Image (tube, helix red, strand yellow):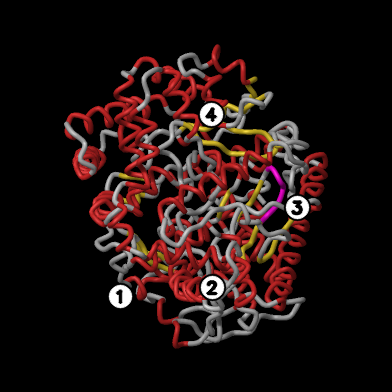
Amino acid sequence: MRQLRWILTTAVLCGANAWAATPMPMSPANGSSPSGIDPAGIDHSVKPGDDFFRYANGDWLKTAQIPADRSSTGTFLKVFEQAEKDTAELIRNAGSSHPAAGSSARKIADYYAAWMDTTAIEQHGLTPLKPELAQIDAIASRQDLAQVLGSRLRADVDPVNATNFHTENLFGLFVAQGLQDPSRNIAYLLQGGLGMPSRDYYLSDDPHMAAFRAKYQTYVTALLKQAGIADAEAKAKTVIDLETKIAKAQESLVDSQDVHKANNLWRVTDFAQKAPGLDWATYFKAAGLDGQPQIDAWQPVAITGLSALTVSEPLQAWKDLLVFHTLDHGAALLPQAYADLSFDFYGRTLQGTPAQQPRWKRAVGATNVDLGDAVGQLYVKHYFPASSKAAVQQLVKNLIAAFNDRIDTLSWMTPATRQKAKAKLVTLRVGVGYPEAWRDYDSLEIRANDPLGNHLHAEKFEYAHQLAKLSQPVDRGEWWMTPQTVNAVNLPLQNALNFPAAILQPPFFDPTADAAANYGAIGAIIGHEISHSFDNTGAEFDAEGRLANWWTPADLAHFKAAGQQLVHQFDQYQALPGLHVNGEQTLGENIADVSGLTIAYLAYHKSLDGKPAPVIGGLSGDQRFFLAFGQAWRSKIRDDALRQRLSTDVHAPADFRAQTVRNIDAWYTAFDVKSGEKLYLDPKDRVKIW
């Protein structure tokens, strides 16, 4: 399901798992200087032209420690850690004034309190899951199976939080405007059905993946045994065998990114013919989709293959799978033994994280996911003043102006394409800080003594919200991130950008800092998101978000050739011994990094208004600009977590994203990079798209 989300909602960073940040002073005490960069983190023993990431961050890397409860650390985590503290304070204080029953503040307080009540959780045992388990036990026919599968369809709406995927459901739902008809919302049906992060974990010959499969068998067995299920070992083998067949039926991440392969509007009555096996009439009725005239089958080959499995595989195998997925999905809010088993596999084994996060951190994270806008309103009130919003809006205007100027100077672009590009830029809708309209949680039932029930209610509430969009006008102002999210997103279908309040904080943005640092950090991020509207996916959508390539054949050929240069460049990067970055899989994000950095640099110089940049701390303006970019991608990650991201993420690892500078001519001048140094590219090999 994540494949479609990354195409239709393209975030600057995946897996940040972060929501909020409070303003931090730019001072030597927190690793910054008046220049807006961290001079102490620079490793002067490394030539910038050999490894810019380690030049910018090498001394920091030597001493940086990944927290025991994290799979990585770096700039984004620095902001996130402050977020945990401040967001937790907002959530804990939500009930201090004894808010009225049913109010958002009451729901926030009750949701958090229930999550923290471990005594009640132990007492409840599996009771919160008994209705679901009984429903599975009652499956006696293929029609029953279709009804249960349909009733469990959930919406995939979170562009950031990997813990909120619903891949364990056989299919997933995404609701947005149509690819060819931007005037109405449609439902997109997506592949799912796996307990591990991606199909590679089941099918890859890599020895590490084989080891993960063996440990997964141990986990599935242990979880079933913990629930008192007989023949747990045999049932675990059945579950994994079925998931392996599901993985074989799924389409790859690269194929799933091809929007043209995904443009498959099927009438509801067509599914039985095009994807025989599943009782689709029963399934769609149970899912509340039976009244839809058409549904987009995003991965048609996978949907056909998954449907066939519902009849080719024994009914009992499906029941075993559903029981495991039900336990697995609820494990964090079941008694501690279940939560420990889940963390041991998904945290320690798959990501190499030694320690589970303290419960308050997990409770804060869950509250932010399930009551995101309610917490977001509190966050904006406390931590995002109007002055910050105005400053960022001005910076955005400068970047858009620079992009517009750049379009005028592209020698390879024909007038017809240039006109279309400008039309798309003019209509680009940029949201800064928070949405214009907040979500209403009045109908969401939250109880102070039912943590798992609260989460399940929240999932159904979100699903109902998404279904309701199918009968409503398209909302071009819709936000896909909460204000307390440390990230940013481009929405090709809406031709819109969201920059949540939380990322608009130091060290990414500080209205009192030097312009070079602001443009190199948040400016490159904003430029990244703007350029997504013109990358290999964005170029497929016109100004109204309609699937319609607006390039002339000659321009498209140039664009694709430049993209292939970038594919080759990133294919060369070895992230782990024998394991390289997939340049095709990460192409859209890499294009956005190159283009965003290019535009941010031009906008920075435009902001100087013809005046020379000051030298601060012995560094020129250009040096500070590029260092701010390199330090924004400061990161240290555990090997197993990196392996997972290489398999599931459309973003290249952070250290290679920092090396994007090698495509910018000005970087060579700023750091006197010479031929023969490892990052040096001949001018003809430097990728220039925008």
- On screen, 466 above or below 245? below
Read off the magenta span.
493-497
How far apart, in angstroms, are the residues tagged by discs 4 and 2?
A: 37 Å
Q: Which of marks 2 and 4 precedes in the sequence?
A: 2
Residue drawn at 65 percent across, 34 percent down: 557
3D distance between C-alphas at marks 1 and 4: 54 Å
Q: Amino acid at mark 2?
A: Ala
Q: Nearer the viewer, mark 1 or mark 4?
A: 4
Q: Which residue is mark 4?
A: 286
**331 in relation to 484, above or below:** above
According to the picture, the residue beneath numbered tag 1 turns out to be 63
* CB-based contact (under 8 Å), mark 3 and mark 2: no
Q: Residues within 10 Å of mark 1 (few under 14, many from 20)?
A: few
* The label number, if any, that marks residue 428 in the structure image: 3
Which of the labelled discs sits on residue 94, or is there none? 2
Which tag, 4 or 3, sits closer to the chain's start?
4
Residue kind at label 4, given as amino acid type? Ala
The residue mark sitting in front, 1 or 3, is: 3
Mark 3: few, some, or many residues within 10 Å (few <14, many ≥20)? Answer: many
Secondary structure type for disc 3: loop
